[in-house]
Image (cartoon, grey):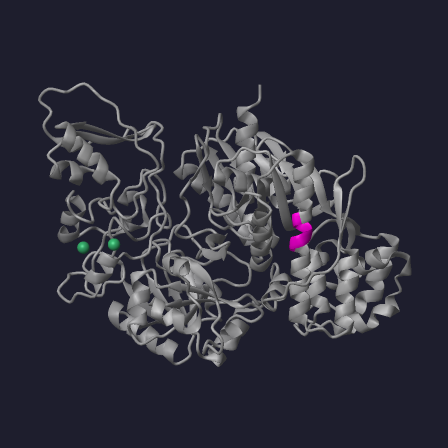
């Protein structure tokens, strides 16, 4: 604004205040009009996003002929000064490759339009002394740019150069320096990677474990050393052209890959691609990202084609971001460490994006997106803290009209993740100066997040039902208060009746909900084991579907088809069926559930796709990955309505027909397609009944099962064909990573309308 005002010779001032940004302008009317037009044109900085502009007349101030940047009123500024970490911009990359530039080949080049932010900020205000760059004293050249209002690096806090900034070195797995100089250490690391070695690389949000993605032996070695990790590995390349060799890149996917947020994007695998088979087994996509740190580009320039770049951690622990911790924990995994001395204050995973109904939607929201707020229609009365869920945890603060959602934290049952959760809450609270008077927790009494919420003193605690929060996350993203028809397809969430809910049709607004329908209850034996071992829901569903006619030996042929687990780390034993069957008969350690995720587990197991979820939704993802396209067939199902009771979706007929297909040896990809098709038709039928009954038209979709692209796309298509306007998550994940946003939105709405 300063640059634009000076160029147009307008007097006045610009400053931050409680309403946002205020600009006072004094000059010819038509020049002011031009200023306003150019403010919103392409002249604005790439990262600037203008939500709205309002202009009013103001009295002329005599003798005012300059334009100034006034210090902001720190008392309750509307917006936080801390923004997300942004991928290297084209200007910086051009300078980095320019031999005559003083930052030629400098891996920490950045400017106002790019570079680290949230990951390096310790506290506010966002000034260099409050970042991890405080230990580097700016040289005169950098200082001159930092202080020049017309320069691209004006007030770019992490500005640095080879003379004054951070440096890179390479160590062996014990931490002994192999190469001390920045440029030669990058070249050496690239050489090790080309030779099939595993290199831990410190980036923007933490360490990656890197290996040549085309070398099967090397990738397998990484998988073995990382232990118990069955998840697909993320990949990195330095150009869209390279990515296109291995995956299908659509127009929108290309835009997302090249965006300043630079997330991992899930792309359909290209048939016969040269990527090592063990990079991403059991799924039909590759997760690709483009280089985003200048260091990545310098590394790839040394003849590296495509790298596995997976999170530097052991199994489900938090991402590692400190040099010493990396050596201590990853010393057994990596052959070498490419280190630097720009401290990462907050670790941030790479964000993951996939596509639903042709639109990019997040599966994991972290680097590049956090801490950008999501805005509400109304200001909330009090600051709010929402504790989130225990799996794929995020938490959320509400302040004024902003919902500030944390980065992906992880599964709280891991002690280190739990510690990281508490630490992160304090950090984000400080950055946004939030003073919560209200805490929201999930209805589940045993959740660790519930226990944390209960431990907070002096705040009012609101408990919110899991699936209602899922629907609320969609409503607040779209600025819709409801009521709507909310369809949630999920793994598990605690219900108001003490059962474990999962597949729900709710009539929901931000202020209240009622349960219109759900998947018919079945018993889930063995508590925690039930979400891992597919045999448990499978036996239960067989018993439910066949009722009195159920005889275990009649299904021996089916049970025999289930792949026995060979993983040495699991205690799972297929011969437990008799024991589990007795458990079901006696109702020992069983809980009623309407979980849809577990039905997917059971079907995947019957089709020989595995019997154990080594990570969340492994079996459902495998079931989706094999779907044969172009199949329109489906199975039968029943919607059962009884007076004064919620409508029940019964899949008994579905399973009987499906098992008959298995017996006939119909190919698994066809059975999987028919199963998915059945669910989309059944959910459409449920929505139509809800429309009839509640006289509502808008459908909102959320829940972890809607990370299944085939099911979600098909359901959306069917709903649209029947004239339902459809809303789904676009800003936060549909899985439990989006739950805290919905929790906070509900608390804000409920409090605002309390009399
Ligand atoms: Zn830049
Ligand atoms: Zn410098």
Is residue 476 in sight in this rendering?
yes
Is residue 391 in sight in this rendering?
no
Q: Which quadrant of the rendered structure holds the N terminus?
A: top left
Outermost residue toward the right in this view: 548
Give the percent coordinates (x, y) of residue 265. 44, 60
Q: Is residue 287 left or right of residue 448?
A: left
Give the percent coordinates (x, y) of residue 427. 43, 42
Let me know if residue 142 is in the magenta part.
no
Where are the magenta residues, as a range? Answer: 680-684
Q: Quadrant of residue 19?
A: top left
What residue is shown at x 44% (from left), y 51% (from top)? 366
Give the percent coordinates (x, y) of residue 739. 56, 44
In this view of the protein, which residue sits in the foreground, 582 or 693? 693
Q: Is residue 719 left or right of residue 424?
A: right
Count the numbered circles shown: 0
Let me know if residue 683 is in the magenta part.
yes
Quadrant of the rendered image holding ligand 1: bottom left
């Amino acid at each position: 604004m300063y640059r634009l005002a000076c160029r147009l010779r307008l007097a006045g001032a610009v400053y931050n205040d409680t309403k946002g940004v205020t600009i006072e302008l004094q000059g010819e009317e038509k020049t002011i009009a031009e200023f306003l037009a150019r403010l919103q044109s392409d002249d604005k900085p790439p990262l600037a996003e203008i939500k709205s502009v309002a202009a009013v007349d103001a009295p002329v101030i005599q003798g005012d002929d300059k334009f100034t940047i006034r210090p902001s009123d720190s008392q309750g500024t509307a917006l936080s000064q801390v923004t997300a970490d942004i991928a290297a911009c084209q200007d910086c990359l051009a300078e980095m490759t320019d031999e005559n530039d003083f930052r030629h080949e400098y891996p920490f080049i950045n400017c106002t339009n790019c570079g680290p932010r949230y990951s390096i900020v310790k506290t506010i205000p966002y000034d260099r002394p409050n970042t991890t760059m405080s230990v580097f004293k700016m040289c005169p050249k950098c200082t001159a740019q930092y202080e020049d209002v017309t320069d691209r690096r004006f007030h770019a806090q992490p500005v640095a150069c080879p003379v004054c900034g951070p440096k890179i070195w390479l160590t062996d797995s014990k931490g002994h320096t192999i190469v001390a100089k920045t440029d030669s250490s990058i070249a050496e690391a690239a050489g090790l990677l080309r030779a099939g070695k595993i290199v831990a690389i410190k980036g923007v949000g933490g360490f990656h474990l890197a290996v040549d993605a085309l070398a099967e032996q090397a990738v397998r070695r990484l998988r073995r050393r990382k232990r118990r990790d069955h998840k697909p590995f993320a990949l990195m390349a330095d150009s869209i052209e390279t990515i296109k060799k291995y995956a299908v890149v659509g127009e929108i996917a290309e835009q997302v890959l090249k965006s300043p947020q630079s997330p991992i994007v899930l792309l359909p695998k290209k048939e016969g691609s040269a990527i090592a088979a063990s990079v991403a087994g059991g799924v039909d996509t590759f997760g690709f990202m483009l280089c985003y740190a200048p260091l990545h580009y310098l590394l790839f320039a040394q003849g590296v084609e495509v790298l596995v770049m997976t999170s530097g951690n052991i199994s489900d622990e938090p991402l590692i971001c400190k040099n010493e911790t990396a050596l201590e924990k990853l010393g057994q995994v990596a052959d070498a460490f490419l280190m630097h001395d720009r401290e990462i204050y907050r670790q941030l995973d790479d964000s993951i994006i996939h596509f639903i109904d042709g639109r990019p939607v997040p599966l994991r929201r972290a680097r590049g997106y956090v801490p950008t707020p999501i805005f509400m229609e109304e200001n909330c009365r009090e600051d709010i803290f929402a504790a989130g869920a225990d799996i794929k945890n995020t938490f959320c603060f509400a302040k004024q009209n902003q919902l500030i959602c944390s980065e992906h934290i992880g599964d709280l049952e891991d002690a280190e993740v739990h510690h990281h959760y508490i630490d992160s809450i304090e950090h984000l609270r400080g950055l946004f100066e939030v003073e919560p008077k209200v805490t929201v927790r999930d209805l589940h009494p045993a959740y660790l997040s519930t226990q944390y919420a209960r431990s907070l003193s002096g705040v009012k605690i609101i408990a919110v039902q899991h699936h209602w929060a899922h629907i609320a996350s969609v409503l607040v993203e779209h600025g819709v208060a409801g009521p709507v028809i909310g369809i949630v397809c999920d793994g598990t969430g605690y219900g108001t009746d003490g059962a474990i809910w999962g597949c729900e049709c709710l009539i929901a607004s931000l202020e209240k909900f009622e349960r219109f329908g759900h998947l018919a209850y079945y018993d889930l034996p063995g508590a925690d084991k039930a979400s891992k071992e597919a045999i448990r829901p499978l036996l239960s569903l067989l018993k439910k579907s066949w009722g009195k006619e159920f005889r275990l030996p009649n299904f021996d042929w089916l049970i025999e088809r289930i792949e026995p687990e060979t993983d040495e780390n699991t205690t799972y034993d297929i011969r437990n069926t008799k024991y589990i069957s007795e458990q079901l008969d006696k109702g020992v350690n069983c809980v009623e559930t309407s979980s849809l995720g577990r039905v997917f587990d059971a079907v995947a197991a019957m089709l020989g796709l595995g019997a154990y979820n080594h990570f969340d939704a492994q079996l459902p993802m495998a079931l989706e990955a094999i779907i044969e396209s172009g199949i329109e067939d489906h199975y039968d199902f029943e919607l059962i309505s009884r007076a004064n009771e919620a409508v029940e979706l019964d899949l008994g007929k579905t399973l009987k027909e499906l098992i008959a297909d298995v017996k006939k040896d119909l190919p698994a990809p066809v059975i999987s397609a028919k199963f998915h098709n059945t669910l989309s038709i059944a959910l459409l039928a449920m929505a139509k009944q809800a429309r009839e009954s509640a006289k509502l038209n808008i459908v909102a979709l959320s829940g972890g099962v809607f990370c299944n692209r085939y099911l979600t796309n098909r359901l959306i298509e069917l709903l649209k064909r029947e004239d339902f306007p459809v809303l789904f998550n676009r800003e936060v994940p549909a899985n439990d990573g989006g739950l805290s946003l919905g929790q906070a939105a509900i608390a804000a709405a409920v409090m605002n309308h309390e009399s």
